[in-house]
């Protein structure tokens, strides 16, 4: 009965399917990527799928459940980078900051389709 309300994975158009479970094990602190070997938190979609007569939220990935130690390291790195207002970003010219933001925007636009697909699954957003 639930199959009529909730699709099976095979009935989702290929263009809207996620390629695979996305397991993030890396995190960024002080400009370097680090690998997390600890606990992970699953990311469940509000989209429910029907499989073998059961209906469940799609599990789309996971992310590190960092500890207080990593939080403290991230805070210390941010304070060091800000340096009481004397760090590289706060003292950078407006033109250079704009250039960095534009570069970020350009690089994000290269990933547009991937981001749109992830948003569809993560928050139940329609493609449009």
Image (tube, rainbow, N blue to C red):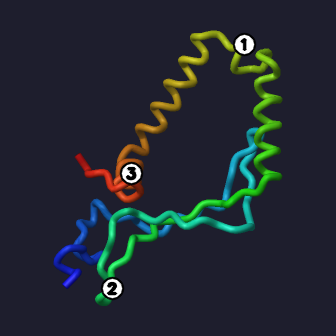
63 sits to left or right of 16: right
Residue 105 is labelled as none
Question: Closer to us: mark 3 or mark 1?
Answer: 3
Residue at far left of view? 4
The secondary structure type at the circle numbered 1 is: helix
Could you tell which of marks 3 and 1 lies nearer the N-terminus? 1
Q: Position of residue 40 (x, y in %)?
A: 64, 66
What residue sits right under mark 2 in the picture? 54
The secondary structure type at the circle numbered 3 is: helix
Gap between marks 3 and 1 measured at Cα: 34 Å
> Residue at (31%, 51%) from the top-left corner?
125
Residue 77 lies, with reference to residue 50, above or below; the image says above
Gap between marks 2 and 1 measured at Cα: 57 Å
What residue sits right under mark 3 in the picture? 119
Q: Position of residue 105 (x, y in %)?
A: 47, 31
> Residue at (39%, 71%) from the top-left corner?
57
Q: Position of residue 128 (x, y in %)?
A: 23, 46
**Image-quadrant location for residue 76:** top right
The secondary structure type at the circle numbered 2 is: strand
What residue sits right under mark 1 in the picture? 91
Residue at far bottom of view? 52
Question: Closer to us: mark 2 or mark 3?
Answer: 2
Question: Closer to us: mark 2 or mark 1?
Answer: 2
């Amino acid at each position: 009965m639930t199959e009529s309300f909730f699709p099976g994975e095979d009935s989702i158009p290929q263009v809207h399917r996620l390629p695979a479970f996305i397991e993030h094990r890396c995190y960024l602190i002080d400009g370097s990527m680090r690998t997390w070997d600890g606990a992970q938190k699953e990311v469940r979609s509000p989209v429910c799928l029907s499989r073998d007569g059961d209906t469940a939220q799609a599990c789309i990935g996971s992310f590190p459940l960092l500890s207080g130690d990593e939080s403290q390291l991230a805070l210390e790195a941010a304070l060091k980078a800000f340096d009481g207002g004397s760090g590289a970003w706060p003292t950078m010219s407006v033109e250079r900051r704009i250039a960095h933001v534009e570069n970020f925007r350009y690089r994000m636009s290269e990933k547009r389709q991937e981001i749109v697909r992830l948003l569809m699954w993560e928050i139940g957003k329609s493609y449009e």
